[in-house]
Structure formats: C-alpha cells, structure tokens
Image: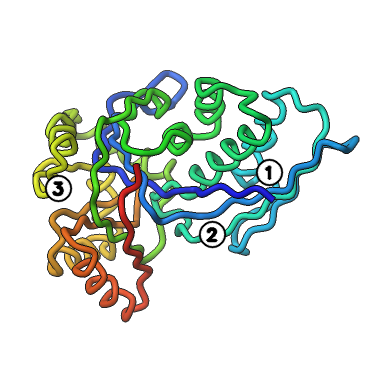
Amino acid sequence: MLHETAHAKINLFLDITGRRENGYHELHSCMQTIGLSDTISADISTDTNTQSISIQCSDASLPTDEGNLVYRAAQMYMQAAHIPSYALDIRIEKRIPVFAGLGGGSADAAAILRLLNRHFRNALDMDSLLALGARLGADVPFCIHGGTCRCEGIGDILTPIMGHPDYTVLIAKNGEGVSTAEAFRMLDETYAVTPHEIRSADKVYAALAANNAPALRHCIYNAFEEVILPIRPLAQQLKDVMNAYGAICTQMSGSGPSVFGIFLSDARAEVCASALRKNGIFAAVCRTVG
C-alpha cells in the first residue's frame, strides 16, 4: 500500500481581483502549507478487466463515491494517464477539519494525484498534473505544489516564493462554516454596493522573504473576513483569544471559519491551544512546511 501526506493550507493573503464571464472568480492569494495533514493510502492494481475505485474514510460524514474529490481526482488521473483498466482501493485518514477553509478536500485530491503519478512513474509531467488539479478546484494546483506560493488566475497560476518561512501556527475551528460558493456570492453582493479596492500583497512577500513574522501583523489580508466575520462571531472570538495569548497576527483561512494565529514559539501556541480545547474547540499547533 502506498501512502501520501495531504497538507492543509492557510491563506496569508487573499483578495478577489476579478470575475470571468463563466462566473469563475480571479484571485490573488499567498498560500502556505502547514504541518496539519491527512494521510491518503492506496492499493493499486492494473491486473483487472474493470475500472473500479473504492474509498474508505475515517470521517463517516464524508461521501465515498463521486461526491468525494479524491474519487474524481483518481478517476480523472487514470483517464489522463491512459490507464485502461484498474482497481483502486483508497483510504483517507482525516485530521484536517472539513468545510473549514483549510483546503482539506483539495489537499486530499492533490495527494491522490501525486501518489498515482509516483506509482505510474510520472506518466504526467508537472504542468499536466497542475492542469488536472485546476479542473478539480481552485486550491488543488497549489496543494499539488505545496510550500509558499503566489497564486493567481483561478488558482492555476503559481509562483513559488523563494525561501521557507519557519513559523509556529495555531489552527482553531469553532462552529459551522460557509460554503465557498456562498462566501463568493456574499462578496459579489457586497462589492456591487461598495466598489472593491484591490489590495497589494507586496508587503506580505517582503516579510516572507525576510522571514520577518512580526511584519505580517500589518499586511496579511483575507477579503472573506469582510462578509464572514459579521455572521460567524465565533471566528472573531477565536482571533481575540489568540491575540490575548500573544499571537503576532491572526486571520481567517480561506472562506473560514477556521482561524490561524502565528506565534513566536511552540510553547506559547500550545498554551493557547490548551485553553481553547478546554472549551471544546478544535485546536492544533503545527509548523509551516516548505
């Protein structure tokens, strides 16, 4: 059985820069992989006359058929790699909270693409793999690549950021999320009333290049906070708690409701995480991953 790690992501910067005629939103995001992860495992056989995919998942609330992004990713890969017959038995061990803005589903889809490509001796080159990921979702290409990247277009234009920021990150989730589609709809309605001034991420990239975590306090940004925090006050409470425990900056990731805080030490982050867990809140301390 083969195994692949599926790392969660956070958005250090996320702004909407336009909307295409087909309804897809163009964005500018600075994404960072973190140590919080799922594990994807698979038994692969091509000695068969069928085309079958079976999925088991540790989270019973998630679908195990075509409704799961991993299923669709595996199916698309086998078609793109021209594998005529196959039996895939896939296992998803979930640790990334679902519907949380952490890219868990995208990370899992990216992981099965990498796993299959490794097994089939890189039948698809990286560009082809990224293009396949873009068909699955905006975050999948980044999750295939990983590290620290400037992401543009609909998430399919990646520019790696040189250097590897080394930060302690606390992830916390409290309450139900909002679907990404609904979050985009709310942003569209807001921007229709109030014109949207596109922000610059230059200061974020400068802070990352200098590995200057404190400088991020004044330049990280997530456009979704404008519409999500007013209707998800628990997310704002998480930010307030992290700030009280010494986070140098806090922000919602993706369309939320997960919040991350960057700390200067693992110990300080663990104290905050312990306090959150005592109140029944999911909290995980990890590091950035290059």
Answer above or below: position of 271 versus 156.
below
Residue 137: x and y in percent read 50, 34
The residue mark sitting in front, 1 or 2, is: 2
Q: What's the residue type where badge 3 is placed?
A: Ala
Dot 2: what SS? Answer: loop
Residue 11: x and y in percent read 30, 43
Dot 3: what SS? Answer: helix
Left or right side of 83 for 256: left
Left or right side of 97 for 288: left
User: Circle 2 is placed at which residue position?
Assistant: 94
Query: Which mark is first along the chain, 1 or 3?
Result: 1
The answer to which image quadrant residue 112 occupies is: top right
Query: Which mark is first along the chain, 3 or 2?
Result: 2
User: Circle 3 is placed at which residue position?
Assistant: 213
Q: CA distance from mark 3 to mark 1?
A: 41 Å
The residue most toward the front is 121
User: Which residue is at a point 16% across and 42% down the rendered structure image?
Assistant: 211
Location of the C terminus (image quadrant): top left
User: Which residue is at a point 39% across and 49% down the rendered structure image?
Assistant: 101
Residue 150: x and y in percent read 30, 30
Query: Which mark is first along the chain, 2 or 1?
Result: 1
Q: Are the residues flagged by discs 2 and 3 in contact, CB closer than 8 Å?
A: no
Q: CA distance from mark 1 to mark 2?
A: 18 Å
User: Circle 1 is placed at which residue position?
Assistant: 66
Residue 199: x and y in percent read 16, 31
The residue mark sitting in front, 3 or 1, is: 3
